[in-house]
Image: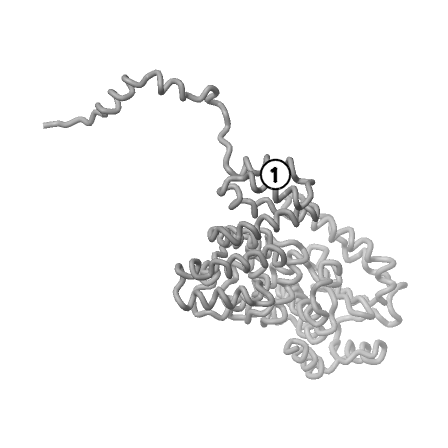
Amino acid sequence: MRYEYQPTSLKTWLRDNRNQVLSHVIEDPNTKYESDIETLIKKFESVKTAKVEEFVQWSEKLSRRQKLLVPNLYSDELNDEAKKGLIKIMQNNAATDKRTFRVLVDTVYQTCNLDEIWNVMKYSYVSHRDRIEKRFNNEQSIEWRDFLLSKDPVHHLAEKAYYSENDFLSVLESFYLTENFPLYKLVLMDVFNFADQDFFIKEKELYKKYFKEATNEEQQKMADGLIRNCQLNQVKDLGKLVFEKLKTYRRKPMLWKYVGEEEKKRFANWILKLEIKDFFGQVNKDHERFQYWEKFIVNLEDVVVTDGKSTLIMYFSDVVVIEVLGTGAVYIYKTSTFNKHFQPKVDKMLAEKERLDGSWIPPKEVKRSELMDKWEIVSGGWLRHVGDWQSKFDDWLSDELGWEVDRDALLQKEAERDEG
């Protein structure tokens, strides 16, 4: 037997109350629904420039629900009177309504205001502590009290999450902090400042995500933490990401002003060593020229590869060295001479490469022939790869430029910098 449901009682009620139903039909079905917060924002516009006392009077006309939503109106863009007025309303509401605490927590996390609103949030917790802590176990109550008493809330959460045996995000969620709040990013940035290498390896996808989304200043601070706390060969893909965005301190000095001096040099040495190895690795990773120049990497400031990856420009503090992959002599110029005669061409090429990055159009590269001028080189700075050329190079660099050329001494200097 087949049964079919029929809302008989409802149909009967609609038939008998047709006129009553029609009288409650919305006149304009296209009217947009307006939420409580949208209504509150419209009301707030009328008192935005009022005095504190007028704010308080205005708030007395609000419903209990609207008073609860007042923290959402707070913004750094407001004038001082408006801020003071909103804080006063929050304080009054915090003293009487337990629910205000939870709203204030979200407001602190959203605005990152760790002064006025943070203090109101603490006041709300103290005012309703017994009722709020009913939802916590003993351990959670202690954690929340420690958090609210901390001098630096961001660093407190960063250390709690980092040193906990539990999942990083789950610890923060126990304080109602989730990824969608701006304060979460501040906590994560703080962790990247002191975390050890294992954390960077474990959370490398998290690092990549936030590094790509970060402002330039944030990227610099993240880079500083990575370089200071890690052996870069162990986090190579993160180091290459830093290089992709920030280049080196010599090439983009303004992109490195928030990074420590030693960290700048250590990162440059590391990435330049990779660049040189890649350059000579086109033929042989054990290439004799790589083996020779590798020892000087500790003093190297920048490297540019050009002319179809056949020419290597190495920048030192006193000279610029032009090396070639294949047949050809080395040209050595004083830095000032190179900057005057050749660097504008290199800068133009680098700018074009950056502009055309990801494009199918190849940038115009500086040819080796454009960097060859015997009239401008350092006296005797035209060195050929013939015979026992390594010893001849060492003698010339030591005698004419005063360079340290002993491999062990240079590698020791590099090791000390890496350890630093």
Q: Nearer the viewer, residue 143 or 17?
A: 17
User: Looking at the rendering, which quadrant does residue 11 occupy?
Assistant: top left
Residue at the (58%, 70%) spot, across then down: 194
Q: As drawn, which residue projects farthest toward the left?
A: 1
Front-most of residues 282 and 160: 160
Q: Is residue 33 left or right of residue 312?
A: left
- Residue 301: image location, x then y, percent: 74, 67
Type of colouring: one colour
Q: Pointer 1: what residue?
A: 44
Q: Residue at x 69, y 55 (%)?
A: 308
The three-letter amino acid code for the residue at tag 1 is Phe
Q: Residues within 10 Å of mark 1 (few under 14, many from 20)?
A: some
- Closer to us: 365 or 160: 160
Above/below status of 20 relative to 289: above
Give x and y (percent) for residue 289: 69, 71
Can residue 301 be seen at all in this image of the molecule? yes
**Residue 61, horizontal then vertical, whole percent:** 55, 38
Disc 1, SS? helix
Residue 355 in view, yes or no: no
* Quadrant including the C terminus: bottom right
Identity of the residue drawn at 75% across and 63% down: 250
- Could you tell me residue 62's position as x and y percent? 54, 39
Numbered label tally: 1
Q: Quadrant of the N terminus?
A: top left
Q: Quadrant of residue 53?
A: top right
346 and 209: which one is in front? 209
